[in-house]
Image: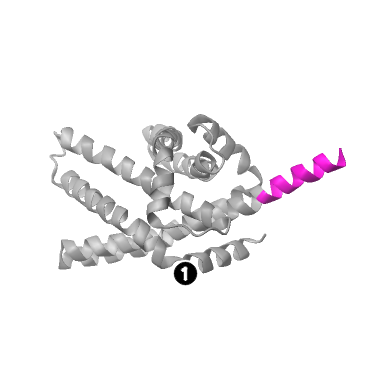
Amino acid sequence: MSLSAILTEAYYFFRNHISQLAAMTLPLLLVQVMIQLWLGNEMIQADVENPQFGGIHAAAMMALLLLFSTLIAALTVYLEVRSRGHDVTTAMVFKQSIQFVPPLLLAGVFSGLAILTPVMLFAVFGPMWLVGLVISFYLFARLAYVNFMVIVEQLTPLEAIKASFVFTGPITTKTIAILMLYIPLSLVGGTLSQIAAQVGFPLQLITDTCFAFLGLFINVALFRLYMVNRKTDSQSSDDTHTEV
C-alpha cells in the first residue's frame, strides 16, 4: 500500500474517532504537558554553574514516563481493538491496557537509551553531533513499532525491540516519512506555544495539549502501516504453508 493511502486511511480513522480519542487521551495529555512545562521552567530558572535537581524532579520524570506509557498502551489497545471491528469504551480500554504499562515502560527505557546513545557519543566531537542525530533518528524509525510488538504481539521488551528492528527493514523509508511529520508539527506548535506563553500559562497549557493530541495522528498512521505489513507477512506465511 502506498504511503499516501496509509496517511489517508489514518486521517479518516482519526477524524471519525476523534471524540473518543479525545475523551481517552486528553486528560492524560493535559497532566503530561503540565509536568513538562513545570520541568522546563525549573530548568530555565536553575543555576547554570550549579544546577540542583532534587527528588521532586526525579518524581516528575518518573510520572512522565508512567503517563506516557499509559497513554501509548491505551491508544494502542484502542487501535488494535477497533482494527478488528469491535466497539470499546474508554473504561474497557484502560482496564485492558494497564497490564501493558510495565513492559512498555521497560521497552521505552531500553529503546530510548539505544536511540539517544549515538547523538550523545558524537556530541563529544563537536560538529559530529549531526552525524549522531541522523543515526539516532534512523534508530528511532527502526524502533518505532516496539509498543505494537509489546501489545499486539505480546512480546517481552527485549523481544519487542528486536522484532521492531527486523520488521521495519522493508518499510524503513515509509516509517521515516511518517515520523518526519513531527517536524512541521513541532515547529508550528512551538511557535504558537511561545506566543501563548506571553498571554499566560493557561493558554500555553491548552495550546501544547492540543498539539500533543494532534501528534497522536502519527501514531495512528504508524499503526496503519504496521497492520498492513503485518497482514502481508501473515498472508505470505499462509501462502508458503499452503504450497508446502
Q: Quadrant of the C terminus?
A: top right
Is residue 53 among what the camera can see?
no
Image location (x, y in percent) of residue 171: 63, 49
Q: Nearer the viewer, residue 225 or 242?
A: 242
Instruction: Give the residue displayed 64% in from the left and 42% down from the top.
Output: 169
Residue 98 lies in the magenta-colored region: no
- Please name the predominant secondary structure of the magenta segment in the image: helix
Q: Quadrant of the N terminus?
A: bottom right
Instruction: Give the residue displayed 39% in from the left and 67% down from the top.
Output: 19
Which span of residues is magenta-colored? 231-244
- Tag 1's secondary structure? helix
- The quarter holding residue 197 reads bottom left
Q: Amino acid at mark 1?
A: Arg
Instruction: Give the residue displayed 54% in from the left and 34% down from the top.
Output: 155
Image location (x, y in percent) of residue 212: 35, 58
Give the labeled residue for mark 1: 15
Image location (x, y in percent) of residue 79: 50, 55
Is residue 84 among what the camera can see?
yes
Instruction: Give the residue displayed 27% in from the left and 41% down from the top.
Output: 63
Residue 235 lies in the magenta-colored region: yes
Neighbor class of circle 1 (other Cα within 10 Å; few <14, some 14-19, many 20+) is few
Image location (x, y in percent) of residue 221: 53, 58
* Position of 59 relative to 82 (above/below): above
